[in-house]
Image (spheres, rainbow, N blue to C red):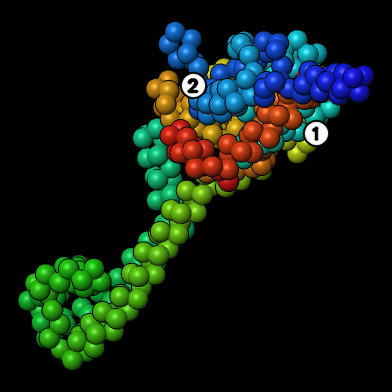
Amino acid sequence: MSRLTALLALFFLCLSLSPASSQITTDTLTIGYTRAAPFILLEEEDQLKGLSVWLWEKIAEDLQIPYEFKLMGFNDMLEALKDGSIDGSINPLTITSDRSKYMDFTHSFFVSNSTVAIRKNSSFQKFINYARSILSLNFLSGLFILMIIIGLFGLAAWWFERKHNDTQFRKGLAGLWDGLWWSAVTMTTVGYGDKSPKSTGGKVIALIWMFTALLFISGFTASIASTLTVNQLKWSPQGINDFKDQTVGCINASGTLDYLDTHFFSAVERYSGLAEGLIALKEQEIEAFLYDEPIMKYRIANDPDYQALEVLPVKFDLQFYAFAFPKARYEVKERVSQKILEYTENIEWRLILAEYDLSQL
């Protein structure tokens, strides 16, 4: 009887030690967030939506995690994660070595990069840039050479035609103008037919000029296009290093700011949020604003207040987004991290990415 009692006691002990469900905590977790569209959007009646919100709600439901959201400033949220006054954050936080010292990151759920926003050129500024290209030294020197060649062939044609075709190629200055006119319309292949050589010498000059003009005008056109392209590139930044000598803005305590500090960007203005930085850019307080590409691109594309701004095709600082938890919430972080892998590997994840016009690198 004593052996049976011992077995029953052991059986009930095992039942008490085994989890009754997949719930990993009975505490109501405080999950901090700050607005970061399209990952976290705050709609009317304080309803949250976005990629991060969708992912967290799925995971919390699966793991039966009770939670409440708390809206915070970005820097306050990082400090709260550090001292444990919140239990986690669903913001798309970039995994960095410095942050990893005082918080735990889940597996990454999105990979992106930083980019650059600048002010769009006005129509007047575009006209000025075009006019500068047209009035450049290369363009004017090419035009001068072209006029000389037109004049030389016009003079040669007039010299042969002045005695044999004096009705079309008159004598004196009027004849020189006739030759210049014929040379110009022949070069441009307009061919009005009002003037044409009659003499053998004039026809030879015409034949040489037609082929020469064809080659010359092709080269001249290519030169103009090249000049315009070069001048266009001069004011279109091709990489992040083009902004090292300019005053740029960035969000304080962000992963992008860490990149700028380690790559010796000296003239960097720090802002508490994206809206503050974009307003500074719009009001010409800074030359460019640097931040996470998907967040900044979504904000500029969907907010009419920033239609005067544009995002450049400049990519730098590869970033891995993840949820973050205080070190004391290691068990929660591990279970959430496993669920992130499960969700980001299925077709539903790709559909939700497409819904928010996001694409993974």
- SS class, disc 2: strand
Residue 264: x, y in percent?
A: 76, 36
Q: Which mark is residue 97?
A: 1
* Residues tagged 1 and 2 counted as in contact (Cβ below 8 A): no
Q: Secondary structure at mark 1?
A: loop
For the residue marked with disc 1, what is the amino acid?
Ser
The amino acid type of the residue labelled 2 equals Lys
Query: Considering depth in this image, is 302 or 228 the residue closer to the camera?
Result: 302
- Residue 297 screen position, x and y as percent: 50, 32
Closer to the camera: disc 1 or disc 2?
2
Q: Residue furthest top?
A: 45
Residue on which the image places disc 2: 49
* Of residues 138 and 290, the one drawn nearer to the viewer in this rendering: 290
Please state the horizontal and vertical placement of residue 81, each as a whole percent of the image. 75, 17
**Quarter of the image that includes the N terminus:** top right
Position of 19 relative to 144 (above/below): above
